Structure formats: C-alpha cells, structure tokens
Amino acid sequence: MKVADHVEMIELNIEGFKINPTLLWDDEMAILVDTGMPGQLSAIKAAMQQVGVPFEKLKAVILTHQDIDHIGSLPEILQESQGKIEVYAHELDKPYIEGTKHMMKADPTKISKEVWETLPPSMQALYMNPPKAKVDHTLVDGQELSFFGGIQVIFTPGHTPGHISLYLNESKTLVVGDAMVLNNGAINGPVPRNTPDMETAIHSLSKFLDYDIQSVICYHGGYTNENIKEQIQEIVQNN
C-alpha cells in the first residue's frame, strides 16, 4: 500500500493475520523497516518488485525491536544480499537480535509448561533456535539518519527494552513497530500480553505528540491518517 512517495507499507500474511513492514527508497537505495517471520523473503522480494524496487537496491534494514515477527527473515535477507545490507537497531535490543541473549518472549525457560505444550512443534523449534543476525549500527533516542530527507529515531521502550519508532521527515509518517496497534481503524496502545512493561510503553507514546504526524504505520493493523494526535493523546491520558 502506497503511503507517500517512495514509502510503501508491505502486507505480509502469517497463517491468516497480516503484518506490515515498511519499504523506503529513492533512486540510489532502499531501506526495509522490519522483516516479517522466518521464510518470508520471497514475499518481501515480490512486494518490492511490485512497486518497482529490485531487491539489489536494498542497502539497509532498520529493526524496531527484537521480536521474531520483526527479525524473522533478516538472516535470509542478509544471506541473499551477500553481506551488502547493514542492520540498524537500538543498543538495548542488540544482544537479543545477535543471539548473545535469548530473545525475551521466545525463551523456553520462561514459558510455562502448559503454554509450551500448546505450541506447535514448528514454533517450539523456532523458540529453541530463534533467528539471529549481526547489528552493524546501534541507534539512540533523537538520532536522525540522513536517508530520504531524514529519519528520526524515537526511543519507545516498554514493548521491549530497546523498542524504537521512526518519524519520516518528508512524508510526516510515523512508523511505530509494536508501540501501537490499529484495530478497525482505531489506534490503540501496545497489546498488553505481549508488552512486559505497559507503564513504560504507554509513557513512551507521549513522545509522539511532539511531531507533526500526517500518517501512522502500525506493524499490526496497518495504516491510518485519521485524528492521529487526538487518538494518541487519549491513550496517554486514559492509561
């Protein structure tokens, strides 16, 4: 889905539900924000091709955070690129992405036996050996990347310790990862059962109020351009 010139929200399907990485590009290069689940490289390449961006143009991946559905296809992307893609993430999630620490929400030692036994064998195997990849550049709050007219890094912890969101200066688009979700066109805070520190996560949303936002891309739920600041203000005030 086209969000703005050279900003595309990619729709990937996982067993009946959608997730939404973001593709950014210009004449020189492309950047992918988040990478879907393991095994979705071909779907990502097809989505890029559909908007006229060859995979070879992809030069960087920015990860909003460490969760499996965000870093899942990163190892395949890096292998396909033969080392020509650089990875950006916040320093607090870096060890989980690189595998020096076990991914927080996929750690079998922290999942109850009852819940573990409900997981299909494929998910158990994935939790035992989650995807991992080297992070080339760590990001900090307030940093501005020079790509595509400027990408501002907003540190939005709570859903994970190193969760970030991105503000695209030219299109005034906010890419929020899992800091917020969209349900039936309405913006909500992060999903509580997947957010270890809801208090911090909700407080993080107040940072968005400092930006002139025309549209939002939620990894779960997709795109909206309706009453964004009013909806965010209500979430912050009522939680």
Image (tube, rainbow, N blue to C red):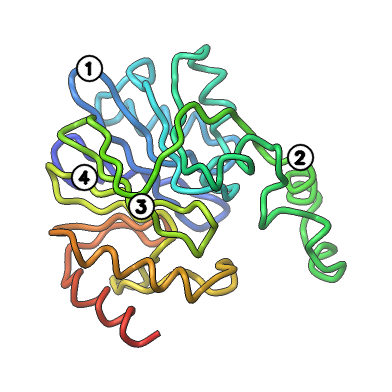
Name the mark on residue 129: 2
Q: Which amino acid does label 1 sit on?
A: Glu
Q: In which quarter of the image is residue 109?
A: bottom right
Q: Name the residue under label 1.
A: 28
Q: Do the residues labelled 1 and 2 touch (CB within 8 Å)?
A: no
Extreme residue toward the bottom, this view = 238
The spot of residue 53 in percent (x, y) is: 28, 24
Residue type pointed to by label 2: Asn
Q: Quadrant of residue 185?
A: bottom left
Q: Count up the numbered dots.
A: 4
Q: Which amino acid does label 4 sit on?
A: Leu
Q: Which of marks 4 and 2 is in front?
A: 4
Residue type, numbered disc 3: Ser
**Label 1 residue SS:** loop
How packed mark 1 is, by other alpha carbons closer than 10 Å (few <14, some 14-19, many 20 or more), is few
What is the CA distance from the residue labelled 2 to the residue labelled 3?
A: 27 Å
Secondary structure state at the residue bearing disc 3 = strand
Q: Mark 3 points at which residue?
A: 165
Q: Kindly report the distance in space between the C-alpha atoms of the residues bearing marks 1 and 2.
A: 36 Å
How many angstroms separate mark 3 from mark 4 (CA)? 10 Å
